[in-house]
Amino acid sequence: MTTKDIFITDKNLKYRKLKSNMVLIFCVFASILTVLPLLYIFFYTTASGFTHLSLDFLIQMPKPVGETGGGMANAIVGTLILIGLASVIGIPVGILSGIYVAEYSGGIFSNIVKFVTDVLSGTPSIIIGIFAYTVIVLTTGSFSALSGGFALGIIMIPTVTRITEEMLKLVPQSIREASLALGISRWRTTLNIVLKTALPGITTGILLAIARIAGETAPLLFTSFGNQFFSLSLDEPIASLPIQIYNYAKSPYTDWHQQAWAGAMVLVLLVFIINLIVRFFTKNKFSSDV
Amino acid sequence: MMEEDFKDDLEEKSEDKFSITTENLSVYFNEKPAIKDINLKVRNKSVTAIIGPSGCGKSTYLRSLNMMHELTPSATVYGSIKINNIDIEEFGVINLRKKVGMVFQKPNPFPTLSIYENVTSGLIYTGNYKKSRLDDIVEKCLTASGLWKEVKDRLKVSAMTLSGGQQQRLCIARTIAVNPDIILMDEPTSALDPISTTNIEELVYNLKKEYTIIIVTHNMQQAARVSDHTAFFYLGRLVEYSKTRTIFTNPKEKLTEEYVTGKFG
Ligand SMILES: Nc1ncnc2c1ncn2[C@@H]1O[C@H](COP(=O)(O)OP(=O)(O)OP(=O)(O)O)[C@@H](O)[C@H]1O
Ligand SMILES: [Mg+2]
């Protein structure tokens, strides 16, 4: 018997190579399927929106039908306010429950929290809009920025909770033990050592959550409603980019269609810029080590 | 003469001071015993080595001394542990851990903190420190752990830029920064290269002037080199506890002899 006999025969090898290539082709094909629509959306939005995007579009109010020009300043500011409100609600609640589930797991209550989080993340956003409508709009008697922010905040919670939990679980147990062994209390360990170590990952999760709610339209129909005018007050209806885009896009006027494209592009850019800003400020000194 | 050595060990001289006393200490995981009825008195300002085959309960013993088992819901601890003649329950877990520091098998500096911040972490996050004293403490502790010369120009860089051996010495500096009486070391050199190992061993030898040290090791030479007393654990029991010289040259138990001469383990 020669050593060659124990290796794979030529025929076998060919077959295996073929199989391996087939799998590779499928993977590449699937990746293209994933990337293509994304690129298409990005380029189409940019191409269509770019021509109408100007400084005026960013700082001017909408013009009445028939007049050209005008912008979406109210909607841009409105969306920023809504994102801010949602973050104020969604980020702390999400992070704290994520901490609870990850660091104090095992109890019945933490399992309940986990279950509810899963259910919540699968709940259609329109239902959460109706919930916010019932809880806030009906009780206060008016559509408001607050109710919109509330709805978006609730939509953020499960994403933030989940990512916090996952990221905390990635922090090695040895880091926790090191901290506790120094006489550092449990909550300080969680907050100053474990959370800090997991921060880059959690930040990414929060950005995903923000990106997702920035474009939410359905829940805003019942809550922040929309506003033709510029408004900063939280107890009044407020304009937002998704709603404005929706209204303009379904209108019969070509000019408004162009405006809608520009609005879509601004929305994409907005998410992108928030992304950059948050990353800049939460950049861990030594994040590359984690 | 050997007879005399042996006698020395059994008799506690009146001037002996004990930092740690465990009586009938047993630890169970899920009702299964990991260590049973360990009676051990560790002498003040000395190095005590714990040796024994894998799984015999060395880490379990060590971790009961600073209440680390608290983190494991399945663990139950029976018996009494006294630190400086005070039952550890009386300290409360936070104060106990300030008195009883721990160095782990794998170097585990805090990855998001700088070298400087790693050393001061135990002070800062327990809230008892004076800002003006921190620089001094950092220098003192890094000097004591033999790291000062190597890192004094880069105190603000990430602790993760250090080599494994340097990281372990940083962990030792971090431990002594909170000013403990006792330092527990669980195989502190098993993840390190020979040169780093020698560094740590010298360090242990120097530290015993100020600290009581228990060191778990799989390395017989290491135990012989650094320790004054050695405890041999087997299957969750304390088989023999004596002067290190006695354990390695004239052990009382056959089991001990077989283990230290490498017949099993
Ligand atoms: N968290 C735990 N849950 C269940 N059993 C455990 C746990 N920790 C340790 N044990 C068991 O307790 C016994 C003693 O383990 P321990 O870690 O103390 O051994 P050791 O002497 O330190 O071994 P090694 O030299 O390999 O580190 C082992 O049988 C181990 O399986
Ligand atoms: Mg061990």
Image: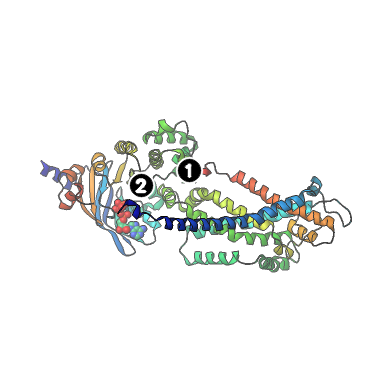
Q: Which amino acid does label 1 sit on?
A: Ile
Q: What residue type is labelled 2?
A: Gln
Q: Where's the N terminus of chain B, which quadrant?
A: top left
Q: How crowded is mark 2: few (under 14 residues within 10 Å), some or many (20 or more)?
A: some
Residue B124 circle label: 1
Labels 2 and 1 positioned on one and the same chain: yes
Q: Where is residue B190 in the image (x, y as percent from the top left)?
A: 33, 45
Q: How far apart are marks 2 and 1 (CA)?
A: 24 Å
- Horizontal arrangement in the rendering, residue B108 relative to residue B190 (left or right): right
- Horizontal arrangement in the rendering, residue A272 relative to residue B171 (left or right): right
Which residue occupies 20% across, 48% down?
B262
Residue B105 circle label: 2
Q: Residues within 10 Å of mark 1 (few under 14, many from 20)?
A: some
Vertical arrangement, residue B61 with respect to residue A137, above or below: above
Which residue occupies 26% across, 48% down?
B50
**Element marked by disc 2:** loop
Q: Where is residue B100 in the image (x, y as percent from the top left)?
A: 35, 47
Residue A289 visible somewhere in the drawing: yes
| Subunit ID for the residue under disc 1 | B
